[in-house]
Image (spheres, rainbow, N blue to C red):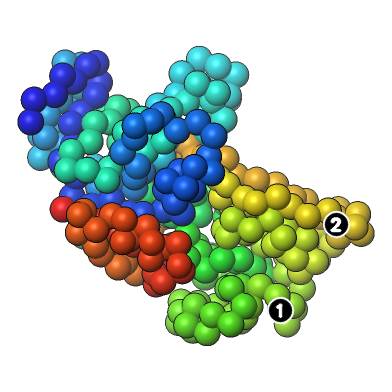
Amino acid sequence: MPVALSGRQVLLRVRACAVCRTDLHIVDGELAHPDLPLVPGHEIIGEVAALGPDAERFTAGDRVGVCWLGSTCGECRYCRSDQENLCEAARFTGYTQDGGFAEYATADERYCFAVPAEYGDAEAAPLMCAGVIGYRSLTRAGDARRLGLYGFGAAAHIVAQVARYQGREVFAFTRPGDREGQEFARELGAVWAGGSDEAPPEELDAAIIFAPVGPLVPAALQAVCRGGTVVCGGIHMSDIPSFPYELLWGERTLSSVAHVTRRDAEEFLALASRVPVRTEVETFPLSQANEALAALREGNVRGAAVLVA
Ligand SMILES: [Zn+2]
Ligand SMILES: [Zn+2]
């Protein structure tokens, strides 16, 4: 396919691209600045098909992964202080530049990652966002031993495995009544699984919220102990209802994770092989991208939905 590559761009033949909740928010018009028209998809596993004039990191045929962080300015206060995820000039795959729900995609080679060889293409795809943003969220939870995960989808099913590997206890919160989701969480080693309207059997040291549901914030604050942390691990969330100061009192911390850095991706991909993280995927052909998005919207995906070539 004829395409003019510039600088350090590479052309990728897409082998697999996972479907993330953020893709849904973009398609549903809930995020403010998509660069329309747009190809969504930011969990790409692809094969390098062509190289820009200055590209040097990879050779044709290499398998690489692309995540949400498409590029950064490299010069601002954030880029210079290991916080490139906060760069105000950053571009994002499948949001402010075209992504991977396609046969081919372009990417800046400096934002591409070697993919651990033991993973198949479809199995590797969810590592690129669910895994990486889940990992960043987990690091924000500090050394919490009893960890709550609100929303047991693609990110949580990976984080649960890493958390167990690190010797933590996982408490999984699903939509109320989602017995299948709770069973899935127990299979992945959760010591307790219940609805997000239930109180856990013990106080938690930290909780990560992956569901885009603002009312879960006061619920999670209620579930963590004094000095505990609640991390909002997604890019979009509905409004947080007002809550009594009592819930934050006691030196509880409420924080958010915004995007990811390349270091997050590198650290997580290395860790994933060691754990080893096993991803549960449900594959759809590229032509059924809309069906995959619909399944995710309805909560009918166990693990992660992945579009495959
Ligand atoms: Zn994502
Ligand atoms: Zn910057």
Where 145 falls versus 36 (above or below)? below
Which corner quadrant of the image does residue 104 belong to? top left
**Separation of marks 1 and 2 at Cα, in angstroms:** 18 Å
Q: Would residue 294 be seen by someone viewing this image from the given angle? A: yes
Is residue 247 found left or right of 90 in the rendered image?
A: right
Query: Dot 1 surroundings within 10 Å: few (below 14), some, or many (20 or more)?
Result: few
Residue sitting nearer the eye, 152 or 287? 287
Query: How many badges with numbers are in the image?
Result: 2
Residue carrying label 2: 243
Give the amino acid type for the residue marked by disc 1 in the picture: Glu
**Farthest-out residue, left:** 1
Where 36 falls versus 141 (above or below)? above
Query: Which residue occupies 77% across, 60% down?
Result: 218
Where 226 falls versus 185 (above or below)? above
Q: Earlier in the sequence, mark 1 or mark 2?
A: 1
Q: Are marks 1 and 2 in contact (CB under 8 Å)?
A: no
Q: Would residue 92 be seen by someone viewing this image from the given angle? A: no
Query: Which residue occupies 38% across, 30% down?
Result: 36
Dot 2 beta carbon under 8 Å from ligand 1: no
Instruction: Say the numbered circle drawn on residue 198.
Output: 1
Locate residue 256, reporting x and y percent.
65, 45
Give the amino acid type for the residue marked by disc 2 in the picture: Phe
Where 57 falls versus 250 (above or below)? above
Query: Which residue occupies 45% across, 62% down?
Result: 297
Is residue 111 found left or right of 200 in the rendered image?
A: left
Locate residue 56, reporting x and y percent.
20, 23
SS of the residue under disc 2 = loop
Query: Which residue occupies 47% across, 26% down?
Result: 90
Query: Dot 2 surroundings within 10 Å: few (below 14), some, or many (20 or more)?
Result: few
Locate residue 120, reporting x and y percent.
21, 60
